[in-house]
Amino acid sequence: MRVKLIKEKFLSLLGLCQKAGKMLSGTVQCEGAIRSGKVFLLILSQEASEATRDKFSHMCKKRNINIIIFGTKDELGGAIGKGSRTVLAVIDKGFKDLLLKEYKKIRHGGDVNGKN
């Protein structure tokens, strides 16, 4: 139950990030932003193809950009008020830090330090 609430908070943060103009979405737009050095965090859908995962993983690793694999395409798109999205790029360090903190809570069952 607690992880579900944290997941909802994570999705809400994605929406806030979008409304603040600190989120890009879609393969072409995100790829260009990575190449230009604007991206602090990349979020890939769990439904992304292996080729898409490999491509973005390589690009981000080369530039030391964090990647999160999270949610369905519909969840990611819905969170930012759009249709299905496979790739989201966060272009603000503050939002990156908030999203990574919430993601760590999801991965560790509710506690950012890995303790329940």
Image (tube, grey):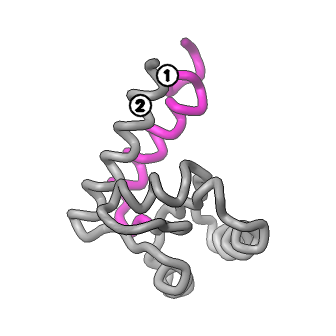
Q: Which residue is mark 2?
A: 6
Residues marked 1 and 2 touching at CB (< 8 Å): yes
Q: Which of pointers 1 and 2 lies earlier in the amino acid sequence?
A: 2
* Count of labels in the image: 2
Q: Residues within 10 Å of mark 2 (few under 14, many from 20)?
A: some
Please indicate whether residue 56 sits to the left or right of residue 86 in the image.
Answer: right
The residue range painted magenta reads 90-116
Residue flagged by tag 2: what amino acid is it? Ile
Name the residue rendered at 76%, 70% in the picture: 54
In the displayed structure, would residue 9 be above or below residue 71?
above
Indicate the position of residue 86 as horizontal and vertical percent values: 55, 67
Indicate the position of residue 74 as horizontal and vertical percent values: 47, 57
Residue farthest toward the top in the current orientation of the protein: 116
Query: Dot 2 lies on which element?
Result: helix
Name the residue rendered at 61%, 52% in the picture: 69
Query: Dot 1 lies on which element?
Result: loop
Label disc, if present, on residue 33 of the rendered structure: none
Quadrant hosting residue 94? bottom left
Name the residue rendered at 42%, 65% in the picture: 90
Indicate the position of residue 101 as horizontal and vertical percent values: 45, 39
Indicate the position of residue 11 as horizontal and vertical percent values: 38, 46
Name the residue rendered at 50%, 21% in the picture: 111
The C terminus is located in which quarter? top right
Q: Which residue is mark 1?
A: 110
In the displayed structure, would residue 2 be above or below residue 56?
above
Residue flagged by tag 1: what amino acid is it? Gly
Q: Tell me, yes or no, whether the highlighted magenta stretch contains residue 93.
A: yes
